[in-house]
Image (spheres, helix red, strand yellow):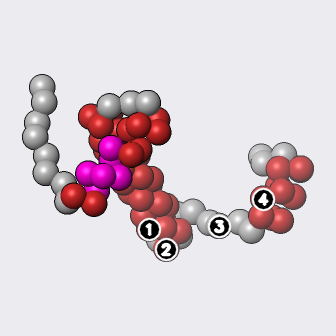
Amino acid sequence: MHSVITVPVYLEQQLISLAHKEKATTDKIIEWALKSLEFDLADVDDAEKAIADIKAGKDTVLTLDEFNKALANGLDS
């Protein structure tokens, strides 16, 4: 199924240039962009849930040094 979308001329030119550079169709570039956006939004949701858990005291944050020490000692120790 194909849908028609309208984009500003400057974005259309960028889309066409990117499609040529990647040797892909403009449809494929748009598909990749939408999938990337979907993954980014899922990452944002995960981050917001993690922050809520930290604020609620359900989880903690380790510094990189603390994490490396815990990893070196075995995380379950």
Q: Which residue is mark 4?
A: 67
Q: Earlier in the sequence, mark 1 or mark 3?
A: 1
Q: CA distance from mark 2 to mark 1?
A: 5 Å
Q: Amino acid at mark 1?
A: Ala
Q: Secondary structure at mark 4?
A: helix
Q: Are marks 2 and 1 in contact (CB under 8 Å)?
A: yes
Above or below, 63 against 31 in this view is below
Q: Which residues are magenta?
A: 11-16
Q: Earlier in the sequence, mark 3 or mark 2?
A: 2
Q: Which residue is mark 2?
A: 55
Q: Are marks 1 and 3 in contact (CB under 8 Å)?
A: no
Residue placed at 33% from the left, 47% from the top? 15
36 or 75, which is in the foreground? 36
Q: In this rendering, would 75 be left or right of 11?
A: right
Q: In this rendering, would 5 be left or right of 25?
A: left
Q: Which residue is mark 3?
A: 61
Q: CA distance from mark 4 to mark 3?
A: 9 Å
Residue 14 spot, x, y in % from top left: 35, 52
Which corner quadrant holds the N terminus?
top left
54 or 76, which is in the foreground? 54
Q: Residues within 10 Å of mark 4 (few under 14, many from 20)?
A: few
Residue 13 is covered by the magenta coloring = yes
Give the image quarter of residue 19.
top left
Above or below, 29 against 41 in this view is above
Residue placed at 65% from the left, 67% from the top? 61
Q: Amino acid at mark 3?
A: Val
Q: Residues within 10 Å of mark 3 (few under 14, many from 20)?
A: few
38 or 71, which is in the foreground? 38
Q: CA distance from mark 1 to mark 3?
A: 12 Å
Q: Secondary structure at mark 1?
A: helix
Q: Are marks 2 and 4 in contact (CB under 8 Å)?
A: no
Residue 22 spot, x, y in % from top left: 46, 35
